[in-house]
Amino acid sequence: MSEKLLEIKDLYVSAGEKEILKGMNLSIGKGEVHVIMGPNGSGKTTTANAIFNHPEYQKIKGSISLEGEDITNSKTDEIARKGVFMSFQLPEEIPGVSVTNFLKYAKNKITGKNVKIFEFKNELQKNMDELGIPKEAVDRSLNVGFSGGEKKKNEILQMLMLNPKLAILDETDSGLDVDAIRTVSKGIQMYKNENNAVLIITHNTKILKSLKVDYVHILVDGKIVKTGSAALATEIENEGYAKYKG
């Protein structure tokens, strides 16, 4: 049995007047890869935002803990410093801040100490080479003028450099071609070890084909209605969600 890393218990979350999560339960152990799938509007992205205590989402009931510590009402930056990372569906563009400087600043904040420049540059170059990111890309403003694929590769580079305990990848494979999906999968494999975990939120099974997935969860109308192995993702690909609705 894996040591628990993240646990969500009986979580109810609303956005504005609408209740979205309606009794969400999820337990993620160290060394595991979990996948959440579900129809549009089922609460997949809300789950990710709730973990990070996004201010637009109100927790009505329930709890979230990381390594046994309650983070239900922790501030977003505190949750990030505790070791949770999120790759966004639509990564923000930040003019005037280079990829390199963003990564240095983020790493400083998470570790609480200044990075050693020589080690940092070596690690950055190694990860860029593995992901096929050109050298000049890290001198550009963060995500400004980047293609969809470049933005997603950059998010994976951030994950590798920041080395979180839990990586939440929200639709990281959305709109990517086969080569870009392969690169993202490679980055996840590079990151993954027995002490961390990955939560992938996706509509698409392509990114799962080259990954060892431990659990697939089907989320419908704000709660998980079915949990299974990677075979469950194949079932959804072939049959859809019809039998899990209603």
Image: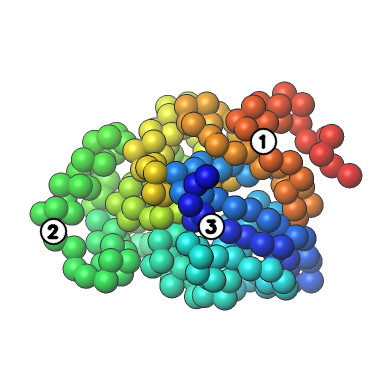
Residue at the far left: name it. 118
Give x and y (percent) for residue 217: 66, 42
What residue sits 75% from the left and 55% below the top? Answer: 222
In the image, is residue 74 above or below residue 129?
A: below
As rendered, which of 122 and 74 lies closer to the eye? Answer: 74
Point out the tag, 2 or 1, that comes first from the N-terminus: 2
In the image, is residue 177 above or below residue 101?
A: above
Q: Name the residue under label 2.
A: 117
Give x and y (percent) for residue 244: 82, 39
As rendered, which of 117 and 193 lies closer to the eye? Answer: 193
Q: Mark 3 points at which residue?
A: 6
Q: Could you tell me how far apart the alpha carbons at marks 2 and 1 are, in whole angstroms? A: 44 Å
Q: Residues within 10 Å of mark 3 (few under 14, many from 20)?
A: many
Q: Residues within 10 Å of mark 2 (few under 14, many from 20)?
A: few
Disc 1 marks which amino acid?
A: Gly
Mark 2 or mark 3, whichever is nearer to me: 3
Q: Is mark 3 on a helix, strand or loop?
A: strand
Q: What element carries label 1?
A: strand
Disc 3 marks which amino acid?
A: Leu
Give x and y (percent) for residue 204: 61, 34
Q: Is mark 2 on a helix, strand or loop?
A: helix
Residue at the far front: name it. 1
Give x and y (percent) for residue 59: 68, 71
Q: How crowded is mark 1: few (under 14 residues within 10 Å), some or many (20 or more)?
A: few
Q: In this view, does 230 lie to the left or right of 129?
A: right
What residue sits 53% from the left and 34% below the top? Answer: 213
Q: Mark 1 points at which residue?
A: 228
